[in-house]
Image (cartoon, helix red, strand yellow):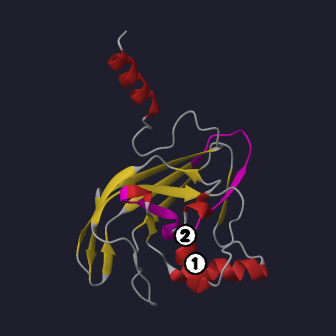
Amino acid sequence: MNARTVGLCLLALALPLAGSARAEDASPLELTLAGAKRLRLGKRGYAGKLLVQIRNRSDKPVTFHHEENNYLVFEGEGGKLDVICHSCACMLNHVENKEGARQFSVTLAPGGKKEIPLVEWGCSGSYWRGPAAGTYRVTYRVFLERRPHKGRPNTCCDELRAAEFWKGAIVSAPLKLAVVGKR
């Protein structure tokens, strides 16, 4: 076997399955991100449909934490992270820290599944800000431990754009997605 063949074999082993978590991942959860290959950006926010599927592949109940659209992470050139940040979800996370509520906690039985459709890109408060037009590697991320935001709700989006925030997250395999259009 020559060096090129060995390199191609190693590359094939390193590539994750399109849209789902790698099989060798020791996490009890399997995350799959599917849907549109593009989001349309306009004056009224984004348009497009994505679907997150989460499956408990362990033999015990598993609780995970998410923030709907906020945990959809766009990785651009040079590894720069961006999110479509829903400030209302940031506010709910902030309130949960103080009151102990669990708006974004889900417990799955062994073999259980949860789907999170990502079809809303704004609310009565406003349309959510996010990445500019371009091509991104997009993943969906969840945590087994609650990940409260450190700052005030208005700094939440900045926290979500920092790589440090995502340490310890369970991450889907990347989906190549284009954001097209103008604001």
Q: Residues within 10 Å of mark 1 (few under 14, many from 20)?
A: many
Whole-percent x and y of residue 181?
22, 72
Amino acid tagged 1: Cys
Secondary structure of the residue carrying tag 2 is helix
Q: Check whether the beta carbons of the residues at disc 1 and disc 2 lie within 8 A of each other.
A: yes
Q: 146 above or below 138?
A: below
Q: Could you say which quadrant of the image residue 45 lies in?
A: bottom left
Q: Which residues are magenta?
A: 55-77
* Residue sitting farthest toward the left: 181
Q: Is residue 39 left or right of residue 144?
A: left
Q: Which residue is mark 2?
A: 160
Q: Quadrant of the C terminus?
A: bottom left
Q: Crowding at label 2, few (<14), some or many (≥20) Cα neighbours within 10 Å? A: many
Residue 157: x, y in percent?
52, 76
Residue 139 shown left or right of residue 49 in the figure = right
- Look at the image and say whether residue 65 sits in the magenta stretch: yes
> Is residue 137 in the magenta section?
no
Residue 137 seen by the camera? no
Residue 156 circle label: 1
Residue pictured at 37% horizontal, 71% vertical: 131
Examine the rendering and report whether any part of residue 89 can be seen.
yes
Q: Position of residue 30 (x, y in %)?
A: 56, 45
Q: Position of residue 93 (x, y in %)?
A: 65, 77
